[in-house]
Image (tube, grey):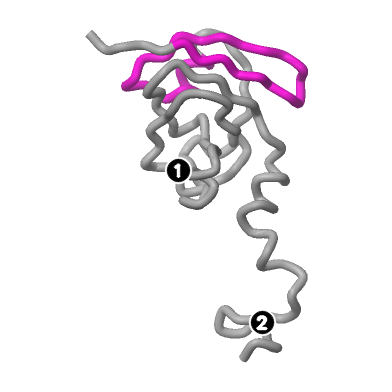
Amino acid sequence: MTKSHKITVHYRQKGTVHTLEVPEDRYILQTGEKQDVELPFSCRNGACTTCAVRILSGTVYQPEAMGISPKLKEQGYALLCVSYPRSDLEVETQDEDEVYELQFGRYFAKGKVKFGLPLDEE
């Protein structure tokens, strides 16, 4: 029998809190949907940041989360669509733009890019 964990999701944008029971071998987003819990999502395959959360407590396993960098994962960010719970968990949804800026913001507004470098750095 697969172990389950209590997942508490603070959905900031809607001002709601949801509690789910999620088995360790199931994605959090998919399980939430089966429990009629509305959570943010878009691609469902770990490539974007629509379902990004900040982990307040607990741990997840998210090997397929391509949409966030290893550095952001270390800082406690996860993608609900491809996260498996590894403990009871409390998370808070994030604005997609906030996470995108944290991850990619340093690359924007630096001028034209050629061969991966801003022209002034070539």
Toward which corner of the image does residue 17 lie, by quadrant?
top right
Q: Position of residue 109 (x, y in %)?
A: 77, 70
Answer left or right for 99 relative to 67.
right
Pick the residue in front: 79 or 72: 72
In the rendered structure, does residue 20 fall within the stretch colored magenta?
yes
> Splitting the image into 4 quarters, where does residue 19 fall?
top right
Residue at the spot of label 1: 65
Q: Secondary structure at mark 1?
A: loop
Whether pointer 1 and pointer 2 mark residues with C-beta atoms closer than 8 Å, the reply is no
Amino acid bearing label 1 = Ala
Q: Which mark is residue 102?
A: none
Question: Measuring 70% from the left and 88% from the top, which residue is drawn there?
Answer: 120
Residue 65 location (% of width, % of height): 45, 43
Image: magenta residue range: 6-33
Q: Residues within 10 Å of mark 1 (few under 14, many from 20)?
A: many
Q: Residue 88: x percent and y percent?
A: 45, 16
Q: Is residue 14 magenta?
A: yes
Q: Quadrant of the N terminus?
A: top left
Q: Residue at x 66, y 52 (%)?
A: 102
Instruction: Kindly report the distance in space between the C-alpha atoms of the residues bearing marks 1 and 2.
Output: 28 Å
Where is the C terminus found, in terms of image quarters?
bottom right
Q: Badge 2, how many Cα within 10 Å: few under 14, some, many 20+?
A: some
